[in-house]
Image: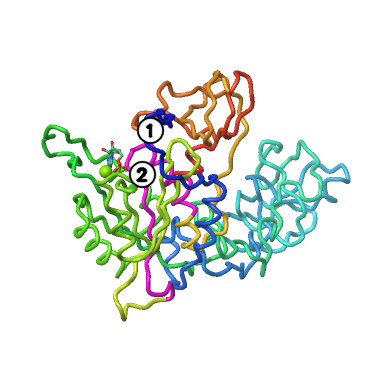
Amino acid sequence: MSTPTSPSSAAPAPAPRAPMLSTADALATLLAAAKSLAGTETISTFDALNRVLAADVVSPLDVPPMNTSAMDGYAVRVADLAQGSRHLPVSQRIPAGHAPQPLVAGTAARIFTGATVPPGADAVVMQEQTEAAEGAVTFLHTPKVGEWITAQGADIRKDTVILPAGTRLTPAALGLAASVGCAALTVVRRVKVAVFFTGDELTMPGEPLKPGAIYNSNRFTLTGLLRNLGCEVTDYGIVPDQLELTRATLREAAAAHDLILTSGGVSVGEEDHVRPAVEAEGRINLWQIAMKPGKPLAFGAVRRAQGATDAQGGEAFFIGLPGNPVSSFVTFLLFVRPFLLRLAGATHVSPRALSLRADFTQTKSDRRNEFLRARVNPAGGLDLFSNQSSAVLTSTVWGDGLIDNPPNHAISAGETVSFIPFTELLY
Ligand code: AMP
Ligand code: MG
């Protein structure tokens, strides 16, 4: 991101510039346009990782479904031991997965972790606090009622909503759904995203670099981010800096996708053809966002050919990211990710920030909202990557996240700053 230069007195008066949008206003505008897609599908719980629930998951049972032992040991009636008796005959053996008999008064039942506590027993004594003898057991401990018993329904009660619609299915959520016996889940259909990359300087890895060329890194970063979010991705690759080709790609992409995402070509240079192409095929707002890195972000829609109708109406959304690798990465994380999660039906789309100590000083403030690549050090504070240029992709791998530094704010060592970990942004 180039820093603004003051016009020299000899230069012609610059065209009036639209005021820069704050990051919060830009995000609010994007999210206001994003509604959950209408289509749903019911899929195997095995296949539902990272998808978003379209319907509440209600538990049809208590979990655990019966009182279970939390230890290997002996199930007893506390009253039998409270009388001062330390020895009880062993009347049955209950492995996990086997139905017990009611506990005979004045006896103990050998029991194992996860096994059903027999009716009549009200505590389990762990085997480490017993001495086993032939057909009997000696207790070295007097249990309390309920000791080492996981009560029926202690985790989940029958008929409660365990996962509300709008939940993104993490591995933990899939486990919870499976714990109540859900073999299938109803989820919002995948968001279909078309992506292409503009710039005549772009070369694919594997090809030799000609003079003036650079490798197309954004193709790897952005498609990886889209896949992490569970999108169905069509990658159109590199589209040359030509208006007609850009328009044709937009038309083709609009027909079968919910969102068209591009990188590069949204500035206001003569070789930036994305904006005029989208204007010709639909509508667009080019925003100057008061953020660093980032700044230009285009948002709009591309018309679909007549007859192609769906729940979203006759157009596909369009988001154009800046070409600078760090800018496109950061604007994706802060704007495209929540937008896509909203289309996918997710309730929670905002990353959670942490308050952490800055272990560095940045005396120079910026009038824009900075998102600084930083790393958590072993002392629990934050170190700053040495080069915060929007072209230096190394910072995105070195860092653990972004410091969200408000406009016009210098950072002093020891100060508490807002840090958004990449774990909150990349998935
Ligand atoms: P632009 O937004 O098209 O003006 O591009 C801004 C800067 O980002 C230029 O230096 C481009 O060469 C670079 N750039 C654009 N697209 C990519 C890409 N896909 N991968 C890496 N760098 C890019
Ligand atoms: Mg370009």
For label 2, the SS is loop
Q: Residue at x 45, y 60 (%)?
A: 51
Given residues 105 and 165, the one toward you in this image is 165
Three-letter residue code for mark 1: Ser
The residue indicated by pointer 1 is 390
Seen in the image, is 222 located left or right of residue 157?
left
User: Which residues make up the magenta segment?
Assistant: 311-338
Q: In which quarter of the image is the N terminus?
A: top left
Magenta-drawn stretch contains 347: no
Query: Within the image, what quadrant is residue 220 found in?
Result: top left
Q: What element carries label 1?
A: loop
Residue identified by numbered label 2: 322
The quarter of the picture where residue 4 lies is: top left
The residue at the point 62 percent across, 54 percent down is 93
The quarter of the picture where residue 328 lies is top left
Residue 236 at x, y percent in the picture: 23, 56
Placement of 9 over or under 114, stated as above or below = above
Say whether mark 1 is within 8 Å of ligand 1. no
Kind of residue at badge 2: Pro
Image point (66%, 60%), residue name:
156
Residue lying at 47% horizontally and 49% vertically, measured from the top left: 335
The reply to whether discs 2 and 1 touch (Cβ–Cβ < 8 Å) is yes
Residue 70: give x, y in percent of width and height. Answer: 65, 48
Q: Is mark 2 within 8 Å of ligand 1?
A: yes
Counting other residues with Cα less than 10 Å from the Cα at mark 2, is it few (<14), some (14-19), or many (20 or more)?
Answer: many
The residue furthest bottom is 307
Q: Left of 56 or right of it: where is 309? A: left
In this rendering, would 372 be left or right of 219? Answer: right
